[in-house]
Image (spheres, helix red, strand yellow):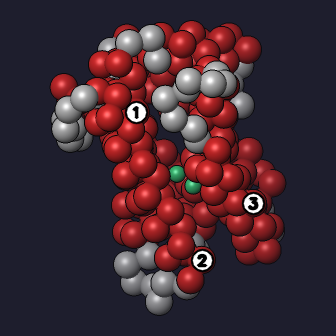
Amino acid sequence: MLSKNRSSSLKAFLEEAVSGPERHARFLNTLSFLEHLGSRKIFLSHRRSTLPGGVLQHLAEETRHASFFRKHAERIGGRAMAYVSGDMLALASSRFYFARLDALVTRLVGGDQDHPYYYVSLAIERRALELYGLYEEILGGAGRPLTLKGLLAEERRHLVEMEEALLRKDPRYPAREKACSEIEGGLFERWLSAVSAA
Ligand SMILES: [Fe+2]
Ligand SMILES: [Fe+2]
C-alpha cells in the first residue's frame, strides 16, 4: 500500500490525467503498455512449461486488458497510438518499473521456477486493484467515458489465484510476500513521480 502522502499524490495525478483528452489518452496507453508487459512476462516465464489452463487464461486476460486500454486510448485521443514516447506518459519509466520488479523479485524468491511468476503477479495485481479502483472512482458516474468494472473483477480473481497458489506452494509466503510488496511500493512511487512530471 502507498503511504497517505503518496495516496493523495496518486489521486492528484489521476485527476489531472483525466482532465483533457490528449493526456487521458496517453495515460490509458501507458496502462495498456503495463498490461502488455504483464502478459509478456507470463508468456516468457512459461515458455518451457506445458501451459496449464489457468496460466493460459491469465495470459489471455492480461493481453485483452492491454487491448482494452489501447482501444479506449485511441477513442479518447481520436487517433491511432503505439508504444512510443509521444503516445505515452512515461515509456522509459514504465519499462524500468516492470524490469526492476521482475529482476528484484526473481532474485529474492528465485529457485523454484514458478515462484517469480506468482510473486511478480501478486504485487502487480494488488497495485492494479488500487490504481484502477481509484481511477474508476475518479471517472465518476453517468457520462463517464469508460468503465473498468469487468476488468477489475478479473484482476480481483487473478489476485486470489496468486494468493491461493503461494499459500499452497511456498512455506515462506508471508515473509516473502511482505518483502515483494516493499520492493513494488518503492518502484511504484518512482513510476508515479515520473508519470506525474511527464
Ligand atoms: Fe491486467
Ligand atoms: Fe491481472
Instruction: Give residue 8's position: percent from left, percent from top.
Output: 65, 11
Question: Which residue corresponds to mark 2?
Answer: 54
Q: Amino acid at mark 3?
A: Val
Q: Are marks 1 and 3 in contact (CB under 8 Å)?
A: no
Residue 193 visible: no
Label whose residue precedes the other's in the sequence (1 or 2): 1
Q: Quadrant of the N terminus?
A: top right
Q: Residues within 10 Å of mark 1 (few under 14, many from 20)?
A: many
Mark 2 beta carbon near ligand 2 (under 8 Å): no
Q: Quadrant of the C terminus?
A: top left
Q: Residues within 10 Å of mark 2 (few under 14, many from 20)?
A: few
Question: Which residue corresponds to mark 3?
Answer: 160
Residue in view at x 77 percent, y 51 percent: 175
| Label 1 residue SS | helix
Label whose residue precedes the other's in the sequence (1 or 3): 1
Instruction: Give residue 104's position: percent from left, percent from top.
Output: 50, 48
Is 82 displayed left or right of 8 in the figure? left
Question: Which residue corresponds to mark 1?
Answer: 28
Residue in view at x 34 percent, y 43 percent: 70
